[in-house]
Amino acid sequence: MEQTLTISIQDYLKNIYELTENGESASTNALASKLNVKPASVTGMMQKLASAKPALVEYQKHQGVTLTDDGKKAALEVIRHHRLLEAWLVQTLGYSWDEVHAEAEKLEHVISEDFERRIAAAMGHPLRDPHGELIPTADLQMPLDDSTPLSSLRASQSGIIQYVKTADSELLKHFETLGLIPEAELEVTGYSPFDHNLTIKIGRKSIVLGLNITSKIYVKES
Amino acid sequence: MEQTLTISIQDYLKNIYELTENGESASTNALASKLNVKPASVTGMMQKLASAKPALVEYQKHQGVTLTDDGKKAALEVIRHHRLLEAWLVQTLGYSWDEVHAEAEKLEHVISEDFERRIAAAMGHPLRDPHGELIPTADLQMPLDDSTPLSSLRASQSGIIQYVKTADSELLKHFETLGLIPEAELEVTGYSPFDHNLTIKIGRKSIVLGLNITSKIYVKES
DNA sequence: AAATAAATTTAGTCAAGACTAAATTTAAAG
DNA sequence: CTTTAAATTTAGTCTTGACTAAATTTATTT
Ligand SMILES: [Mn+2]
Ligand SMILES: [Mn+2]
Ligand SMILES: [Mn+2]
Ligand SMILES: [Mn+2]
């Protein structure tokens, strides 16, 4: 159970984790488009991961996949690497939050456990990455997330941004411009049922945000 | 000329560079044992690198290989990454000089040019890595090395250690114990012609070193 | 229930980079 | 010059992880 998994496999597992966080299984197509790979390639890899010893995914034809406990551990290991690296790149090398993702994406697969421990310790064991996302603990537990998408709030509800869920650096720059960053407080002042736009007050400004944005901002209601 | 070379190719080029620093060409066998690969695999890769456009090596059957200018640039890029990373790991994460090599060996292939620039700047553009080895400049020139192996000194000659050339962590720990580190001053007090042992005085101690050690310590005569 | 569309799987191919075994070339000795 | 050993190359195989095209399964409409 302690062989080193290939970079491809690590990426598959990480992406399956993200697609199954909601409890549903990950479809072949969803995985394929997330991984920039053809569906046929995903099927092949799922068959392989399902019949690995120990199995890393639970797979049934046409039913999508979920992670086994072993698969989840492996996924959380990669995610911990990724998020610690992002935090470290920002803190020690002055990367901005829209620049870190690509670099961390490559480094996550090659750092040693020793390196992981050293940067975690150097930063005082941070709980969140620069986007506010929770960092799996050293023993590979994902901390509880008590936030909800901003898109689920309605007029008069207010909250504090916990994290933004995107790797799109243009969108991240946009978020920053608008002050939509972790810890920021906001209040929903309006909701447009047809296009799902929300009007929110943040700082002293009032802005209108579409679902494509509000679904990527996670807040803790207050 | 700016495609990204595979990790394997980067490793081949780096090792060819090291084997040809003395001016000679690198033999198939030498390369194979350095890369932990079979000679047949080396031949295959040399044919590929020689016929790449642009060619990365100059290769003639049974004659060994040398790097073309393009190949040398690529090799120096990897070596610059490696040595900057070693320096960075030691300076910011407290790695010891016997621990850094393996980590840098993996990271060297995946960091971006941006990352390279950032760590170089953060350290004030260091000239040498933790072992004292010269770091290729940002424009990929290898600085002139004015040192010679300790093994070439004889009684009454003295020098200052410039660098130690080994990746063996046990040997590095041994060097450290003996004070055989960059900047250290030493004097040769004796030479045994049959086994090539040198007696040297370093600090207030006198020690006898075999060729296997003295050939890996590079000094500037003083 | 049949037809169509969408999602998924199967089958067969390809490139990279390793390997083994056999053939060949060069170098060293007699 | 011939033999033998060592180094190197050739030929053919394997694994990984992609791909395309075709077949199949599931979901949606009429
Ligand atoms: Mn990745
Ligand atoms: Mn992040
Ligand atoms: Mn390497
Ligand atoms: Mn070094």
Image (spheres, coloured by chain):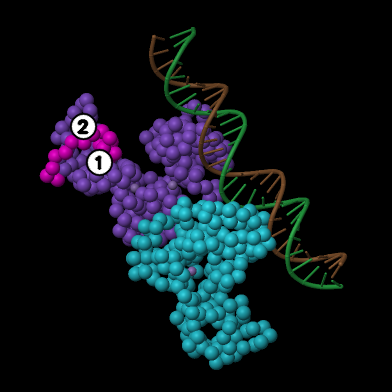
Chain colours: A purple, B cyan, C green, D brown
- For the C terminus of chain A, the image quarter is top left
- Residue drawn at x 57%, y 40% is A52
**B212 in relation to A196, above or below:** below
Q: Is residue C26 left or right of residue A44?
A: right
- The residue beneath circle 2 is A197
- Residue drawn at x 28%, y 43% is A171
Q: Nearer the viewer, residue A179 or C5?
A: C5
Residue type pointed to by label 2 = Asn
- Residue drawn at x 15%, y 32% is A190
Name the chain under label 2: A
**A33 in relation to B48, above or below:** above
Q: Which numbered circle lies on residue A198?
A: none
**Mark closest to the chain's N terminus, 2 or 1:** 2
Within the magenta stretch, is there residue A205?
yes
Which dot, 2 or 1, sits closer to the camera?
A: 2
The span from disc 2 to disc 1 (Cα, nearest Å) is: 16 Å
In x, y percent, where is residue B64? 64, 63
Instruction: Determine whether the residue tagged by mark 1 lies in a helix, strand or loop.
Output: strand
Q: Which numbered circle lies on residue A219?
A: 1
Q: Is residue A119 shown to the viewer in this render?
A: no
**B61 in relation to A68, above or below:** below
Residue segment shown in magenta: A203-218
Q: Is residue A54 left or right of residue A113?
A: right
**D12 in relation to B77, above or below:** above
